[in-house]
């Protein structure tokens, strides 16, 4: 596998790295890099943990912390590669505490949109690759949503919210949809033309992160805004 340009930004000596990307896109590249450049065995290595979470909850962070406190079995460091689509506020606080007290474990966090992270947590990472990475599926779904008449958008929101309730989809998917809509609007029209729309979408992005908020109401508002 050819080395990706962003892997050149991985400077050994740090304990937390942040990569803009996805489980399918960037994690295989990272594993190849670690095997080739750091001589880390990536298959059957008890000191290497690779996990993906559509939504990273505080329970997941507590589990990661417990594993990080265990001593490495081999001679090398313990390495955690954690990819996620969305992180709750409680999870961010838990990781912040973990990074404030380094355990000797090296962390690689992979997420499509690093700008979602709180500034206090973001400051603990060495940012290897920045920028927003929308999935092709999110962009296609966003295009279809933009092209729908208002009534169809409401039906879409209703089904989307039901899928979140039934755990077929996640709030991270809803957030990704809103962000993909923003990207498409930015490509088609200038910021000045869409200033009011961007402001409303920013508000919707903020509310969708609140676990107690209504996914349907927020997506309905997105549909009304366009």
Image (spheres, rainbow, N blue to C red):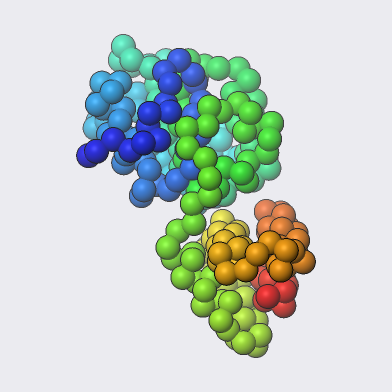
Q: Where is 76 relative to 56, above or below?
A: above
| Residue 193 visible somewhere in the drawing | yes
x, y percent for residue 29: 32, 39
x, y percent for residue 104: 48, 15
Q: Where is 24 relative to 11, above or below?
A: below
Left or right: where does residue 56 sit relative to residue 8?
A: right
Task: Look at 47% across and 37% down and name the residue there.
Answer: 129
Left or right: where does residue 156 sit relative to residue 215?
A: left
Quadrant location of the N terminus in the rendered image: top left
Task: Look at 56% across and 35% down and name the residue there.
Answer: 61
Q: Where is 11 relative to 44, above or below?
A: above
Between residue 26 and residue 76, name the one nearer to us.
26
Quadrant location of the C terminus in the rendered image: bottom right
| Residue 212 visible somewhere in the drawing | no
Task: Look at 64% across and 37% down and name the residue there.
Answer: 92
x, y percent for residue 198: 71, 62
Left or right: where does residue 98 sit relative to residue 41?
A: right
Q: Where is 105 relative to 8, above or below?
A: above
x, y percent for residue 214: 71, 66
Number of numbered tags placed on the structure image: 0
Between residue 183 and residue 75, name the one nearer to us.
183
């Amino acid at each position: 596998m050819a080395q990706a340009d962003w892997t050149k930004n991985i400077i050994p000596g740090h304990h937390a790295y942040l990569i803009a990307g996805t489980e399918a896109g960037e994690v295989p590249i990272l594993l190849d890099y670690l095997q080739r450049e750091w001589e880390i065995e990536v298959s059957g290595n008890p000191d290497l943990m690779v996990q993906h979470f559509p939504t990273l909850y505080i329970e997941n962070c507590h589990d990661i912390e417990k594993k990080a406190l265990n001593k490495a079995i081999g001679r090398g460091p313990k390495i955690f590669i954690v990819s996620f689509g969305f992180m709750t506020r409680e999870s961010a606080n838990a990781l912040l505490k973990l990074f404030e007290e380094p355990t000797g474990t090296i962390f690689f966090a992979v997420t499509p949109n690093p700008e979602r992270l709180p500034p206090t947590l973001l400051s603990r990472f060495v940012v290897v690759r920045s920028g927003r990475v929308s999935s092709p599926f999110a962009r296609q779904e966003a295009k279809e949503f933009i092209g729908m008449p208002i009534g169809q958008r409401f039906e879409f929101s209703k089904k989307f919210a039901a899928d979140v309730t039934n755990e077929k989809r996640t709030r991270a998917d809803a957030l990704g949809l809103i962000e993909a809509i923003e990207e498409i609007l930015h490509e088609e029209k200038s910021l000045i033309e869409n200033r009011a729309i961007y402001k409303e979408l920013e508000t919707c992005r903020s509310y969708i992160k609140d676990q107690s908020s209504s996914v349907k109401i927020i997506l309905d508002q997105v549909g009304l805004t366009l």
